[in-house]
Amino acid sequence: MPVYTVMAGNVGLNLKIIIPFLYELAWPFKNGLGKVKLNGKLGIIDLAGKTRLAFEFDEIDEALSGFL
């Protein structure tokens, strides 16, 4: 289930921004990777916020993607 916010990101326990608040939606991370939505398209990022799968998909099936 997605986490709905105005802009999604992640702040660490020390209040340092880990993932910038620029995503429209963010799902929970699994195995160090997370599905996020940017400009209406889905992609995969890692815990450092680096894009691992380009933002060019309308759907990413978590069960079949092998990423999550």
Image: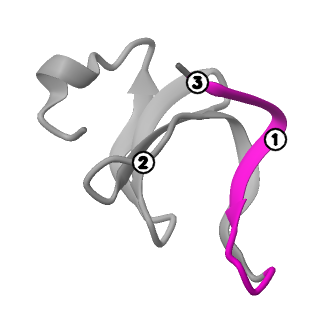
Q: Quadrant of the C terminus?
A: top left
Q: Secondary structure at mark 1?
A: strand
Residue 40 rendering spot, x and y as whole percentages: 63, 21
**Mark drawn on residue 7:** 1
- Is there CB contact under 8 Å for labels 1 and 2? no
- Chief secondary structure of the magenta span? strand
Between the residue at mark 1 and the residue at mark 3, the CA separation in whole angstroms equals 12 Å
Q: Is residue 11 magenta?
A: yes
Q: Which residues are magenta?
A: 2-15
- Residue drawn at x 81%, y 33% is 5
> Which residue type carries mark 3?
Pro
Quadrant of the rendered image containing residue 32 = bottom left
**x, y percentage for residue 65?**
17, 27
| Kind of residue sitting beneath label 1 | Met
Counting residues from the N terminus, which is met first, the one under dot 1 or under dot 3?
A: 3
- What crowding class fits label 3: few (fewer than 14 Cα within 10 Å), some (14-19), or many (20 or more)? few
- Residue where numbered disc 2 is placed: 29
